[in-house]
Amino acid sequence: MQADVIVIGAGIVGAACAHALAQAGQQVLVLDAGVGGATGAGMGHLVVMDDNPAELALSRHSLALWRSLVPRMADDCAFSPCGTLWVAADDAEMVAAEEKQQRLGQHGIDCRLLSANQLATAEPALRPGLAGALEVTGDGIVYAPNAARWLLGDGGSNIHIEAAEVVAIEAGHVRLADGTQRRAPQILLANGIHATALCPELPIRPKKGHLLITDRYPGTVHHQLVELGYITSAHHAEGPSVAFNLQPRPTGQLLIGSSRQFDTTDMAVEAPMVAQMLQRALRYIPALGDLNAIRSWTGLRAATPDSLPLLGRHPWREGLWLAVGHEGLGVTTATGTAQLLAELMTGAAPAFDPTPYAAERFTATATA
Amino acid sequence: MKKTETVALRINGQTLSVRAGTSVAAALRIAGSADMGTARRSVLGQARAPFCGMGICHECRVDIDGRRRLACQTRCEDGMVVETSA
Ligand SMILES: Cc1cc2nc3c(=O)[nH]c(=O)nc-3n(C[C@H](O)[C@H](O)[C@H](O)COP(=O)(O)OP(=O)(O)OC[C@H]3O[C@@H](n4cnc5c(N)ncnc54)[C@H](O)[C@@H]3O)c2cc1C
Ligand code: FES
């Protein structure tokens, strides 16, 4: 096979890019080292985020693309259109909920405010005394490792997959650990947190996260629940932080997050972080204390200085494209990422403005 | 030391008397000779029974007095209510 594009990495981002490129008629060779990554470790919440206009544009387009894939997706991708409840603990957070509703509403995203009573009816497991919530009905969840596998398979004969570790990227080809080379006119880097091993110049830092999953308790919670304080507490903090984030799995299990720690690559589960995370969760759902947890694990998010991914051409390496740095939102934004990259790489007009995600935003200041 | 002390518990509605100190996992086996002491069902509906006996594998999860517990790590008590297929 003569590949048009080599994709490095078969996590959710690489798989979605390969899928979009295959649909655009490209012959795609996907190389994956099998070292695993964030796709197998994350929560798989498909969520519109609006910390800034670029994040909103990317996540909003991505959600629409996910919804278009869902009818064809395999059952084991475990998609559920559960929606998100952004839970407001007090009046100040309720004001934040109203502002969020206005921002999302302006972009045509279905959402509605729930009063304290409506919230108690929607999610009786939440403690009394919360102020209310913003319900975003179009959000959902997916089991990302299976979605990645499904996307690669759905690419049909245009996608070829090889188990191989790339050790160097050179003009027009990549070098593999076994000493052989693979050639293609275009190469797309989509290997998540491992990107800096091949491109040390990229501004990506690990941001460790803990998750914990319970035994099956069907019907306890119905929506993905996220505390509104999350927006301020977790997203912008430099030190370790936790936020209440809870997902009802289709099996009836509850997936509980989340924690954030910078600059450690130690994958060990840290009991103090888990304890802090669970204490936070108990403040919202006291009855969690009676449930049985069965597993806890960690993953590394690939974070950029402004929390937006690096999408598009590498600033100076010929023929190299980037789809890395998706931080805590890469499952959601995989589809929008893929659409944008496939359009840029085939010379089509991009569906939305790609400039906020271009890696030049960092190199420009570095060389100025 | 009382050698013959027994406790009575209910497993899926059936009353069972066992020697004091017996684990719930052992009680499941005593009660369920027909199903090899099944504790629960997997997501795909397969039977699961106590396996490691030491709190590691979590295959022995059952509801004990309304809470999901490890049968191998819990001693039978008088009046205890155990439900399998959790
Ligand atoms: C705790 C936690 C919770 C999260 N929750 C959510 C959430 O709710 N919603 C959401 O949208 N996102 C979430 N995320 C983020 C999301 O999981 C990631 O952004 C996403 O999975 C990144 O996918 P990826 O394909 O870029 O990278 P990865 O999944 O890391 O995949 C990289 C792939 O590259 C391969 N690879 C690495 N090096 C090489 C090499 N040299 N040669 C060949 N192959 C190589 C690896 O084997 C791997 O398969 C979460 C992340 C964490 C850690
Ligand atoms: S039998 Fe393994 S944990 Fe109980």
Image (cartoon, coloured by chain):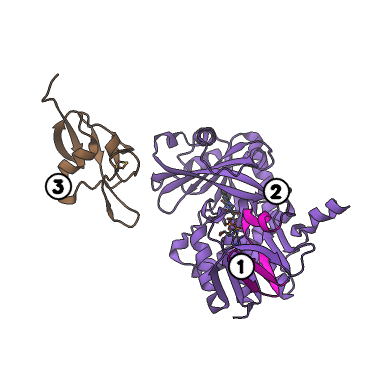
Chain colours: A purple, B brown
Name the residue tied to disc 3: B33
Q: How far apart are marks 3 and 2 (CA)?
A: 59 Å
Picture residue at 61% right of the left edge, 74% below the top: A28
Question: What's the amino acid at mark 1?
Answer: Gly
Question: What's the amino acid at mark 2?
Answer: Asp
Residue A178 is a magenta residue: yes
Q: Which chain carries label 1?
A: A
Q: What stretch is highlighted in magenta?
A: A172-199
Q: Quadrant of the N terminus of chain A?
A: bottom right
Image check: A317 left or right of B64?
right
Check disc 1 and report its element: helix, strand or loop: loop
Q: Which chain carries label 3?
A: B
Q: Nearer the viewer, residue A77 or A4?
A: A4
Check disc 2 and report its element: helix, strand or loop: loop
Residue A21 is a magenta residue: no
**Residue A325 showing in the rendered view:** no
Check disc 3 and report its element: helix, strand or loop: helix
